[in-house]
Amino acid sequence: MTVVLGYDESPGAVRALHVAVEVSAAFDEPLVLVYGAAAPGALGEEYAAHRDALREAGHTALAHAVQVADEAGVRTTVEVIDQKPAEALIDAATRHAARVIVVGSWGESPLRGALLGATPHKLLHLARTPVLCVPTEP
């Protein structure tokens, strides 16, 4: 089993990283660090440039998370996936037989999450894997 973390360097994701590292260490399981990098649109040179920029941003963000996990002695796998964040996390959780998906939250209200399609909101309704939603510190 593994722990899957959605990470994008947002304040909620930073706090979720520390929780995910604790869970991975407690169960002695690897941590799969996921960045959903779906570019809008589907064709053309502009799409390819946007996709490449998102992938690069994902690798940069995940490098920080790997460093934090390494310092705690937690094994990691990095995945930059060409899907929207919720779909990328569900996909990774399924492929890695995850114990839990950990994701940060900005403390959005349920209505705002539903209207904006927030990743935590989607995961709570679509994932078959348990979801640990970590609030941003005040």
Image: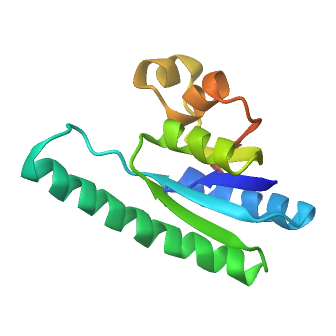
* Quadrant housing residue 83: top left
**Going by the picture, which residue comes out furthest to the bottom?**
71
Left or right: 59, with 45 as reference point: right
Q: Residue at x 57, y 41 (%)?
A: 91
44 lies above or below 75: above
Q: Residue at x 58, y 20 (%)?
A: 110
Residue 92's x, y, as percent?
60, 48
Tally the numbered discs: 0
* Quadrant housing residue 73: bottom right
105 lies above or below 25: above
27 lies above or below 131: below
Q: Nearer the viewer, residue 49 or 116?
A: 49
Left or right: 135, with 55 as reference point: right
Q: Nearer the viewer, residue 114 or 32?
A: 32
The answer to whether one can see residue 47 in this image is yes
Residue 121's x, y, as percent?
58, 27
Colour scheme of this structure image? rainbow
Image quarter where the N terminus lies is bottom right
Residue 114's x, y, as percent?
50, 19
Residue 96's x, y, as percent?
70, 51
**Going by the picture, which residue comes out furthest to the front?**
95
Left or right: 96, with 83 as reference point: right
* Quadrant housing residue 26: bottom right
Q: Residue at x 68, y 52 (%)?
A: 4
Q: Residue at x 63, y 21 (%)?
A: 125
The answer to whether one can see residue 135 in this image is no
17 lies above or below 121: below
